[in-house]
Image (spheres, grey):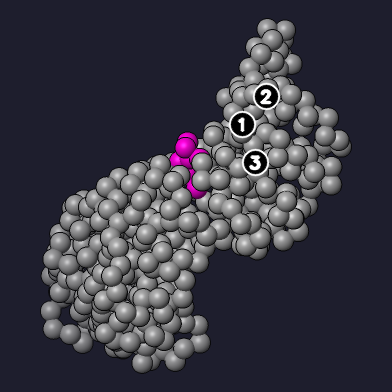
């Protein structure tokens, strides 16, 4: 009776409601006299499989004048009668629509079929349009979306739609996803009026050259209620400048992903300025939460920094960057990683006790930069969550350097253990043994993220007396534990 067709597990919400209405006379009477129940189940993804529109029309009749929720995917693939009925409902019941979620290729539709979107939307609280080609439809319209009247609108996503920064309905939004081509100035002009905003996602900023003159008089957006920003684009500098022009709470989380960074944005002075803008945001967030758990990853073409929340409900912060595919990597690597790690060396990281990291195929200069980062910035590490490749790289550097890396290390966590991967040697054994010989033994080896058959391949660790191993086994609910040296070497209890 409370079926929600927008929930992933509720694809048959209408089907369940229909069956519930036929259980008994009292249930049927209850459902048939509840227009809002049916109005929230205008599921055209369900209607498309019906031979005719008779059931869809019956649901519409039962909905009466109640506020309506509509879901539809790939309208262009619907039978013609269902497709026509969808646009008929859109046209005739627009004033009733409260939630509208549409995904389709709009190129195969006409501008006239979308006329309803340009009328007043008195009840609309959420619009989610993923319409490829919608920019062409918009270009043919000489009028504003919703006729500038959508007083109840809270959540807005319209792929490729470039709205006016003067639209009055922007002021009430609590969530917006922007995928149209805005310049930095246009984007900030629009966002600064969204004072109720809690979630902001940006997937595009109009060309990187919009940020060429950093002295331009860009507006500032004060968003006191914002709790999460998600930015995914290829214009590093424009994205970083945008972040700098936001005034948000210290606990506002951020995902900043930049792929295929342009040559212009790769200039050292621009990289430093961009990284500093991002680092200021990240440091403020980490200090607010007193973060003690982070992850850092790097390889020849990527680098990322992320805090690791201790619960799924907690927000997180992540900056992830990758170079242009096919670039010569050596010149790029040498300074990008140096600048990144130098900029993200916050004093608050000295409190970090848990680090997750993977460092894949690093050249010597990158490896040296990464190890220096571990030594200087993260001196209090107690738990190291990594893989054997990274362990091998660290072991090689540790043998050549003065002083022990991660002197407070207590626990090593692996997600994969392959003792024979490095030509019959075991990086994890060599690493643990070197720690023992240096008088700083690791106390716990946590293999609970490895495959359940890992227990069959651990006997070679028996001589590391005192090491506590944790792992799981198929069919056994509890985590298994064993202290090396406590059993019989010839028959270890693995």
Q: Closer to the observer: label 1 or label 2? A: 1
Rendered image quadrant of residue 477:
top left
**What is the spatial separation of the Cα atoms under label 2 and label 3, in whole angstroms?**
15 Å
Pointer 1 or 2: first along the chain? 2
Q: Is residue 126 above or below residue 387?
A: above
Q: Residue at x 47, y 71 (%)?
A: 206
Q: Residue at x 22, y 84 (%)?
A: 399
* Spot occupied by residue 68 in the image (x, y as percentages of width and height): 62, 31
Categorize mark 1 by other alpha carbons within 10 Å: few (<14), some (14-19), many (20+).
many
Q: Which residues are magenta?
A: 150-156
The answer to whether the residue labelled 2 contacts the one labelled 3, judged by CB atoms less than 8 Å apart, is no
Q: Is residue 461 above or below residue 114?
A: below
Q: In the image, 53: left or right of 182? A: right
Say if residue 333 shows up in the picture: no
| Residue tagged 2 | 63
The answer to whether the residue labelled 1 contacts the one labelled 3, judged by CB atoms less than 8 Å apart, is no
Specify the quadrant that holds the C terminus.
bottom left
| Residue tagged 1 | 96
**What is the spatial separation of the Cα atoms under label 1 and label 3, in whole angstroms?**
14 Å
| Residue tagged 3 | 71
Categorize mark 2 by other alpha carbons within 10 Å: few (<14), some (14-19), many (20+).
many
Categorize mark 3 by other alpha carbons within 10 Å: few (<14), some (14-19), many (20+).
many
Q: In front here: 428 or 363? A: 363
Q: Closer to the observer: label 2 or label 3? A: 2
Q: Closer to the observer: label 1 or label 3? A: 1
Pointer 1 or 3: first along the chain? 3
- Is residue 1 rendered magenta in the image? no
The answer to whether the residue labelled 1 contacts the one labelled 2, judged by CB atoms less than 8 Å apart, is yes
* Spot occupied by residue 261 in the image (x, y as percentages of width and height): 42, 79
Say if residue 344 shows up in the picture: yes
Pointer 2 or 3: first along the chain? 2
């Amino acid at each position: 009776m409370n079926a929600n067709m927008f929930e992933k597990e509720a694809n048959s919400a209408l089907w369940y409601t229909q069956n519930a209405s036929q259980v008994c006379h009292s249930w049927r009477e209850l459902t048939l006299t509840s227009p809002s129940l049916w109005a929230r189940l205008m599921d055209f993804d369900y209607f498309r499989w019906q031979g005719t529109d008779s059931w869809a029309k019956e649901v519409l009749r039962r909905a009466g004048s109640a506020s309506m929720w509509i879901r539809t995917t790939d309208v262009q693939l619907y039978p013609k009668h269902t497709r026509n009925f969808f646009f008929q409902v859109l046209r005739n019941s627009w004033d009733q629509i409260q939630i509208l979620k549409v995904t389709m290729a709009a190129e195969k539709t006409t501008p006239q079929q979308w006329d309803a979107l340009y009328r007043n939307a008195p009840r609309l609280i959420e619009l989610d349009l993923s319409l490829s080609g919608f920019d062409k439809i918009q270009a043919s319209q000489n009028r504003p979306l919703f006729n500038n009247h959508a007083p109840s609108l809270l959540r807005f996503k319209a792929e490729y739609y470039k709205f006016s920064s003067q639209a009055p309905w922007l002021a009430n939004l609590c969530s917006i996803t922007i995928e149209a081509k805005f310049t930095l100035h246009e984007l900030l002009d629009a966002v600064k009026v969204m004072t109720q905003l809690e979630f902001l996602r940006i997937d595009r900023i109009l060309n990187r050259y919009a940020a060429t003159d950093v002295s331009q008089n860009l507006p500032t957006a004060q968003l006191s209620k914002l709790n999460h920003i998600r930015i995914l684009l290829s214009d590093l500098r424009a994205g970083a400048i945008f972040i700098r022009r936001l005034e948000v709470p210290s606990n506002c989380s951020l995902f900043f992903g930049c792929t295929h960074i342009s040559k212009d944005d790769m200039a050292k002075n621009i990289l430093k300025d961009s990284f500093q803008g991002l680092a200021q945001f990240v440091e403020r967030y980490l200090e607010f939460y007193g973060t003690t758990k982070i992850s850092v990853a790097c390889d020849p073409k990527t680098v990322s920094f992320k805090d690791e929340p201790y619960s799924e409900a907690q927000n997180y912060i992540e900056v992830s960057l990758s170079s242009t595919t096919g670039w010569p990597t050596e010149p790029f690597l040498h300074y990008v990683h140096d600048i990144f790690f130098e900029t993200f060396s916050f004093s608050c990281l000295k409190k970090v006790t848990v680090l997750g990291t993977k460092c894949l195929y690093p050249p010597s200069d990158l490896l040296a930069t990464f190890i220096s980062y571990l030594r200087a910035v993260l001196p209090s590490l107690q738990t190291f969550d990594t893989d054997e490749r990274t362990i091998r790289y660290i072991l090689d550097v540790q043998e050549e350097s003065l002083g022990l890396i991660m002197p407070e290390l207590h626990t090593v966590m692996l997600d994969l253990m392959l003792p024979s991967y490095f030509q019959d040697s075991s990086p994890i054994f060599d690493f643990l043994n070197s720690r023992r010989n240096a008088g700083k033994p690791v106390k716990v080896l946590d293999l609970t993220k490895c495959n359940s058959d890992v227990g069959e391949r651990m006997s070679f660790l028996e001589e590391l007396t005192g090491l506590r191993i944790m792992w799981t086994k198929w069919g056994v609910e509890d985590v298994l534990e064993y202290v090396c040296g406590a059993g019989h070497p010839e028959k270890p209890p693995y």
